[in-house]
Amino acid sequence: MIYRQKKHLYLLVIILRDLVNYKGGIINIEIEIIIIRIKGKEIIISFNILLLGNDKVVLGMLWL
């Protein structure tokens, strides 16, 4: 999968709109557009990502 610099950056916030300060708190990378097929439906999407480096999780964030 190829990732690239986002053109329009934005702040990383949790659902309560609290800012996340990890890695500067800015989402600045996205993956290329991909096609996801689920139960016969196709979704064309690009995901925003936060590179974690050697870290396993962003501490303090609840994960679903």
Image: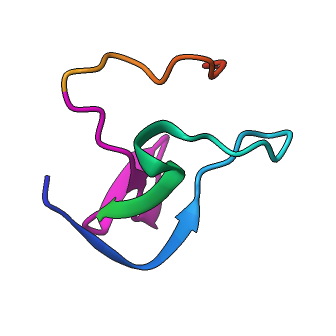
Along the line of sight, the residue nearer the viewer: 37 or 4: 4
Q: Residue at x 14, y 52 (%)?
A: 1
Q: Residue at x 30, y 69 (%)?
A: 33
Q: Colour mode?
A: rainbow
Residue 48 inside the magenta-drawn segment: yes
Q: Left or right of 23: which side holds 18? A: right
Along the line of sight, the residue nearer the viewer: 40 or 64: 64
Q: Residue at x 38, y 64 (%)?
A: 28
- On the image, the x and y values in percent for residue 8 come to 47, 81
Quadrant of the rendering where the C terminus is positioned: top right
- On the image, the x and y values in percent for residue 53 come to 21, 31
Direction bottom: furthest residue: 7
Q: Within the image, what quadrant is residue 5 found in?
A: bottom left
Q: Residue at x 62, y 18 (%)?
A: 60
Numbered range of the magenta stretch: 31-53
Q: Within the image, what quadrant is residue 32 found in?
A: bottom left
Residue 37 inside the magenta-drawn segment: yes
